[in-house]
Amino acid sequence: MSRSADRFRIDGDTHASAVALRLMDSADSWSPSKSFANDVSAALPSFEGSTGDKPECAYDGCAAGWSKRWKRRARPVFEDSWGCSKACLRALVDASVRREMEGADGAEVAEEHEHRVPLGLVLLAQGLVTQEQLRSALEAQKVAGRGRIGEWLVEAGGVAETKITRGLGMQWQCPVLSLSGFDGIRMALAMPVVLRELCRAVPLRVAGGRILYLAFDENVDAAAAFALERMSGMRVESGVMPRADFVRAVQMLDGSATVKCREVDVADRNEMVERVVDALQKLQPVASRVVRLRDRYWMRLWLERGAFGKNGTLPATGDDVVDLVIRIRRK
């Protein structure tokens, strides 16, 4: 079991997120369970829109209209849409998964930095390091066969870390961020730990109620910013952060409660679609979305209306929100 999943066992709690957690932690298979469906029905009551009108199926190919089974249920909601049957819901999910697999994930933004000037040359051109310091760092890096040039400039060249960070900001054409305004408890809910660690990213703070700052310690990952922007509904601004501050921020995030997360490996796209549909049917979210980040597909499910915070779709707390991170196994 993954560290993320193992962290969230709760017994004797009738809260909706606890019902979801018991399913995610204890089920060996994700096949639908009648007993769990009854449990979910009790914990997550059906509802209709504020006008009393029945929701319309969002699948263009729907021919069945309302099904008796889902007649008075406005859940699950997937990417602002609702399907009147499992077949219609599956069609909606399949279209979204295809979109993520075939579409851009921020890689086109990353291409702008593909041929960026090496950090050492940026620092040298700006007078932040000397030729001798750069030469010593490159030689130490070559002998060790590991590490990044910024680390070796500090260790072997005696360059101040603040200079390295300034150079990174110039190299990536982004701001240098600080820990000022950082709220670890709140930002720990922004994205799953596994994705934070994958991209070496730290959600830092919200500014003006609509801008979310995302910090990196060296390499700015445009795909991470793009995925978080789509999931949060906020504008994401990326920047670099001094290594010491970055490490401290990670420690604070690791010490805070996060959204419950389950990591799943699947064989192919069809199995991914089935997993998503199964989660939607079992957990009956009021909102859900899937976005791609590199080779991972991040699904977030908001189980209750009160799960939304004041900024975008960032969770107010770790309750009533569940993350599912899916990866297709390499053949």
Image (spheres, rainbow, N blue to C red):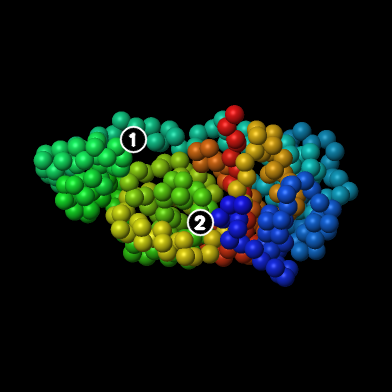
Q: Nearer the viewer, residue 307 or 272?
A: 272
Kind of residue at badge 2: Ala
Name the residue rendered at 86%, 45% in the picture: 67
Percent position of residue 93, x then y: 68, 40
| Picture layout, residue 39 above or below residue 131 | below
Percent position of residue 121, x then y: 19, 37
Q: Identify the element where label 1 is drawn.
A: helix
**Image quarter (top left, top right, bottom left or bottom right) of the C terminus:** top right
Quarter assignment of residue 17: bottom right
Q: Around disc 2, counting alpha carbons within 10 Å, would you say few (fewer than 14), some (14 to 19), or many (20 or more)?
A: many
**On the image, numbered disc 1 is attached to which residue?**
113
Answer with left or right where residue 293 lies relative to residue 123: right
Q: Which mark is residue 313?
A: none
Q: Which mark is residue 190?
A: 2
Name the residue rendered at 42%, 54% in the picture: 202
Quarter assignment of residue 210: bottom left
Name the residue rendered at 68%, 44% in the picture: 276
Kind of residue at badge 1: His
Q: Residue furthest bottom?
A: 12
Percent position of residue 206, x then y: 43, 60
Q: Is residue 308 visible?
A: no
Q: Identify the element where label 2 is drawn.
A: loop
Q: Nearer the viewer, residue 146 or 186?
A: 146
Answer with left or right where residue 238 lies relative to residue 104: left
Percent position of residue 145, x then y: 29, 37
Q: Which comes sooner in the sequence, label 2 or label 1?
A: 1
Q: Nearer the viewer, residue 52 or 110?
A: 110
